[in-house]
Image (cartoon, rainbow, N blue to C red):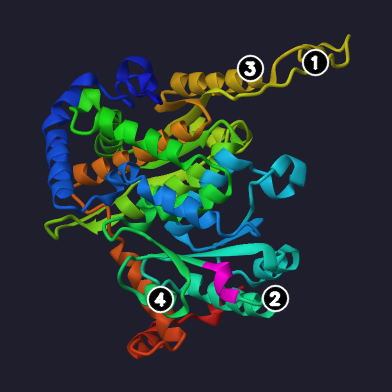
Amino acid sequence: MIQFDFNYFMDEFIGSEHGIAKKDIDELAPQCDAALKRMDDEKAKGLLGFLELPFAGSIVEDIRAFKATVPWCDTVALIGIGGSALGPQALKNALADIYLNELPDTDRGTRCRAYFFDNVDPGEMQSLLKIMHIPSTLFLVISKSGGTTETNANFAILLDAIKKHTKDYKKHIVTVTDPDKGILRQIAKEEGFVSFPVPANVGGRFSVLSAVGLVIAEFLGINTYGLLKGASSVVQRYYGNNVWENAPLLNAAFHYLFDIKKNKRINVLMPYTRKLYLFADWYRQLWAESLGKRFDIQGKEVMVGLTPVAALGTIDQHSQLQLYLEGPHDKVITFLKLKGFGTDIQMPQFYKGKQELEYLGGKSLRKLNEFEEQATELVLKEAGRPNASIILPELDEEAVGQLIMFLEMQTAYAGYLYNINPYDQPAVEQGKRFTFGLLERPGYEDYKEKFVKGYVKKDSYIL
């Protein structure tokens, strides 16, 4: 089971100016209890589908049954953005292989290659089209609403390419979308595309344990039952427990207190393996979009939000750590640590007689990673900089499923402590409307006019 080590959040280690005292958590207990009740009430109303996903294993059998019908597929291309792509990419890097596409077939085995179309970048699109073999590629079009402009733009280009390079384009397309409504659901029915549902009560950034992540995971050889088992164990262990017996709630409470009591609103997630780095990317959306809100649930203007930053150990010891140690006291750092890497490499003898180099000979690369991470914890502690660790026993499906659910529950609890809705993203919609207007989508003519009037700049301010 994953562990939450919060020693260096506590005032007894980093001092009362920047650390949190036990009494601070105890005084927050009534708000934590209210957060537990709110989660319980919303879950009872059927609003929190992300908590139910780990117990809905039947979708795995449906995916596996479909996979057996496409033995020709050796590549999967995912078309999506935000929550429809960040989680699947994190799963691929953590549990398949960072360099899966470059592996020789003998090492890749039955695992499919994977490509991700998650941006509107003509250069990247052209480069990917040059290297992909479309006749052996299955395209996953993922959009819960079906109206995501970026996803539909990439789908339009790729659909045209699929039609040009295959005899039966329909067998190369799978949709993952709302079970009943939306334009992508409508198209899937009209075209006869195979389709998997995103439950209506699961938001995009909380959807990685739905078909959004599970379909591609199966094609990458990932044990999806293991993911769900790990996630379910976190729900079973922590759901409903008080703050001192509920690690996701406790971590949410720490971050809330660091904000309102200590003025620390930048939250760094720093894995010490590249295989988990894309989880920091996934977490950035989960945390930022969920907690950055102008109004609370009563409509009062509050303008809350915690800024997530992704870092990677040991690389960012040589780029960001200087700022974390001597810059503003406005950051909270969480390390993602692995107890077991599952592999190691011993360094050979290295320039004997040269003391600046020979000390490395015979040492373990795994131990070097561990020592660097521990040294970073210590120097941060000695500088009074709060840091904690989420520790994974090993990098397997159960541990990754636990990590996903831990961070999702923590994010939800944090939203409740701020008295906001952590499941919507109202501000993002305005930018979408302006884009629709510029693209001349019917019904958005007013937004084009507003854009033309508002998007005004002075040439004198451009050098």
- Asked if 448 appears above or below 239 in the picture, the reply is below
Q: Spatial distance from mark 3 to mark 1, Cα to Cα?
A: 18 Å
Residue 408 lies in what quarter of the image?
top left
Which of pointers 3 and 2 lies earlier in the amino acid sequence? Answer: 2
- Residue labelled with disc 1: 356
The disc label shown at residue 323, or none: none
The three-letter code of the residue at mark 3 reads Lys
- Residue labelled with disc 4: 189
Q: Do callouts 1 and 4 mark residues in contact (Cβ within 8 Å)?
A: no
**Quadrant (top left, top right, bottom left, bottom right) of the C terminus:** bottom right
Mark 3 is surrounded, within 10 Å at the Cα level, by few (under 14), some (14 to 19) or many (20 or more) other residues, namely few
Whether 178 is among the magenta residues is no
Q: Do callouts 3 and 4 mark residues in contact (Cβ within 8 Å)?
A: no
SS for dot 3: helix
The three-letter code of the residue at mark 1 reads Glu
The disc label shown at residue 165, or none: 2
Percent x, y of residue 277: 55, 41
Q: Do callouts 4 and 2 mark residues in contact (Cβ within 8 Å)?
A: no
- Asked if 420 appears above or below 3 in the picture, the reply is below
The three-letter code of the residue at mark 4 reads Lys
- Going by the picture, which residue comes out furthest to the top? 353
Closer mark to the observer between disc 1 and disc 4: 4
SS for dot 1: helix
In the foreground, 269 or 152: 152
Whether 171 is among the magenta residues is yes
